[in-house]
């Protein structure tokens, strides 16, 4: 958990709300009252994680599960950021080294790493991250657009920035992280 984030039941004044580990209650900054997650109008529920000291987040609705590191079976002729595939209860899915995919280097995998299983449309993938931090709600008005960068292509991976108490979280686009024209998600014959 972030050291500066309040516990459920404590208020903040920046449009940020904390969801309890059980996902039962959150605190809204607007009304200062307890509410069920998802009942706050015009808010987003996100999950944050760390990669190389950077804080990133995605929409919690994209997350199917979080699991400990499982060695992946390497597949030939795959992009560098695809570590291989794992079998998730009968479904074979790619595991993406998110650090590598974002151009931040290659992860030296250890047992402390976590795989965040995400689903975009009908495709599953595991995102290898250093650590999962927390789930939280934030007013959608706090999500700022990504400034133009000196780049040949648009920033496909990040669609918004969230500035909270001196921290900057990049909100990732799950669909853009998936391997292009690389659909390993398949049902394993029983």
Image (tube, rainbow, N blue to C red):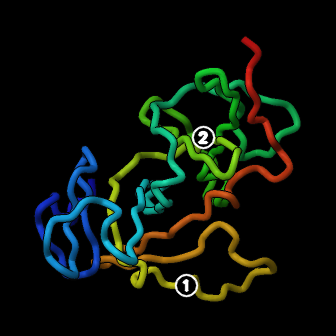
Decide: is 148 above or below 164: below
Disc marking residue 160: none
**Which residue is denoted by mark 2 in the rendering?**
126
Disc marking residue 145: 1
Indicate the position of residue 14 as horizontal and vertical percent values. Answer: 25, 81
Indicate the position of residue 43 as horizontal and vertical percent values. Answer: 38, 73
- Alpha carbons under labels 1 and 2: distance apart: 26 Å
Residue 22 falls in image quadrant: top left
Name the residue rendered at 58%, 82% in the picture.
Answer: 146
Secondary-structure class at tag 2: strand
Residue 25 falls in image quadrant: bottom left
Indicate the position of residue 92 as horizontal and vertical percent values. Answer: 70, 28
Tell me: 128 left or right of 78. Answer: left
Q: Quick one: which residue is furthest to the top in this view?
A: 190
Tell me: 159 left or right of 8. Answer: right
Decide: is 141 above or below 187: below
Name the residue rendered at 11%, 62% in the picture.
Answer: 9
Decide: is 152 above or below 56: below
Q: Look at the numbered discs 1 and 2 and tell me whether their residues touch, using CB distance below 8 Å.
A: no
Name the residue rendered at 70%, 37% in the picture.
Answer: 94
Judging depth in this view, the residue of 12 and 163 nearest the camera is 12
């Amino acid at each position: 958990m972030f050291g500066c984030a309040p516990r459920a039941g404590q208020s903040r004044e920046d449009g940020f709300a904390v969801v309890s580990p059980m996902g039962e209650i959150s605190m809204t900054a607007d009304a200062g009252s307890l509410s069920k997650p998802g009942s706050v109008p015009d808010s987003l529920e996100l999950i944050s994680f760390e990669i190389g000291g950077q804080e990133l987040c995605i929409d919690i609705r994209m997350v199917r599960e979080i699991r400990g590191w499982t060695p992946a079976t390497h597949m030939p002729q795959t992009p560098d950021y695809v570590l291989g595939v794992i079998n998730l209860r009968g479904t074979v899915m790619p595991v993406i080294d998110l650090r590598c995919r974002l151009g931040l280097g290659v992860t030296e995998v250890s047992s402390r790493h976590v795989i965040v299983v995400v689903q975009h449309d009908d495709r599953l993938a595991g995102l290898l991250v250093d650590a999962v931090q927390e789930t939280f709600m934030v007013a959608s008005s706090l999500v700022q657009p990504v400034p133009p960068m000196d780049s040949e292509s648009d920033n496909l991976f990040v669609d918004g920035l969230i500035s909270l108490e001196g921290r900057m979280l990049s909100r990732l686009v799950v669909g853009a992280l998936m391997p292009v024209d690389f659909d390993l998600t398949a049902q394993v014959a029983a």
